[in-house]
Amino acid sequence: MKTAYSSRHVAILILLVATVAVAGLVILKSRPADNGGDQSLVDDIISRLTTSYERQAEGIITTYLTSRRDLLQQGSVDDDATARQQWATLAGTAKTDLLALRVPEDYRDVHLQLVLLFTGIENSAASDLTAVQTADNQLDALITQYPWLVADLALRQSL
């Protein structure tokens, strides 16, 4: 059995289909043609993260180096267990502060190297000053390779 539709039902159906089609076109036209806007947002976020990381890491390294310099100027750490413990504490604080940072992908390697160096200094300061000196020399080499780690030129030149 065939169902008969009145002309009024057909007109409403056509109007409904036309409305949905127009709404779909409006939605499609309002969207950007490409994802360039999304990529621009991603690039901006990465840039801000990188700048923030550089600034925070530089502050951590500068604090460590300044405190290390002050500690070493007070006298020899060779025979001073308290001074060696202070050096270990300085390194432990730097490590903890670095671990709290959000790290951009491009800096993951240098970040890992820094954390490992400070871990080595923290663990060795009380007993093995040769290992500490080796780790400090490696830190100085990283600072030479990544000058943004120490913005203070006078401090960098005193290494």
Image (cartoon, helix red, strand yellow):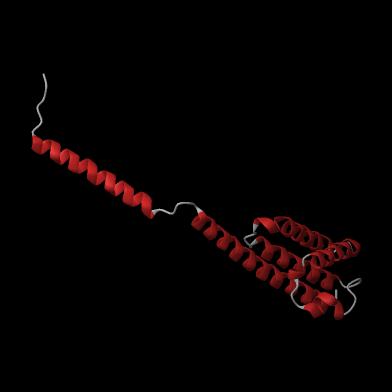
Q: Quadrant of the N terminus?
A: top left
The image position of residue 7, as x and y in percent, is 9, 35
Horizontal side of 17 relative to 68 (left or right) equals left
The image position of residue 73, as x and y in percent, is 86, 80
Q: Nearer the viewer, residue 71 or 30?
A: 30
Q: Quadrant of the C terminus?
A: bottom right
Q: In percent of the image, x 72 and y 59: which residue is there?
A: 111
Image: 125 above or below 63:
above
Determine the residue located farthest toward the top in the rendered image.
Answer: 1
The image position of residue 92, as x and y in percent, is 74, 65
Q: Nearer the viewer, residue 140 or 45?
A: 45
- The reply to whether residue 71 is in sight is no
- The reply to whether residue 51 is in sight is yes
Q: In percent of the image, x 84 and y 69: which residue is there?
A: 84
Counting labels gives 0
Q: In percent of the image, x 14 and y 39: which residue is there?
A: 11
The image position of residue 4, as x and y in percent, is 9, 27
Horizontal side of 30 relative to 119 (left or right) equals left
Q: In percent of the image, x 50 and y 56: which residue is there?
A: 38
Instruction: Give residue 100's quadrant in the image.
Output: bottom right
Horizontal side of 142 relative to 2 (left or right) equals right
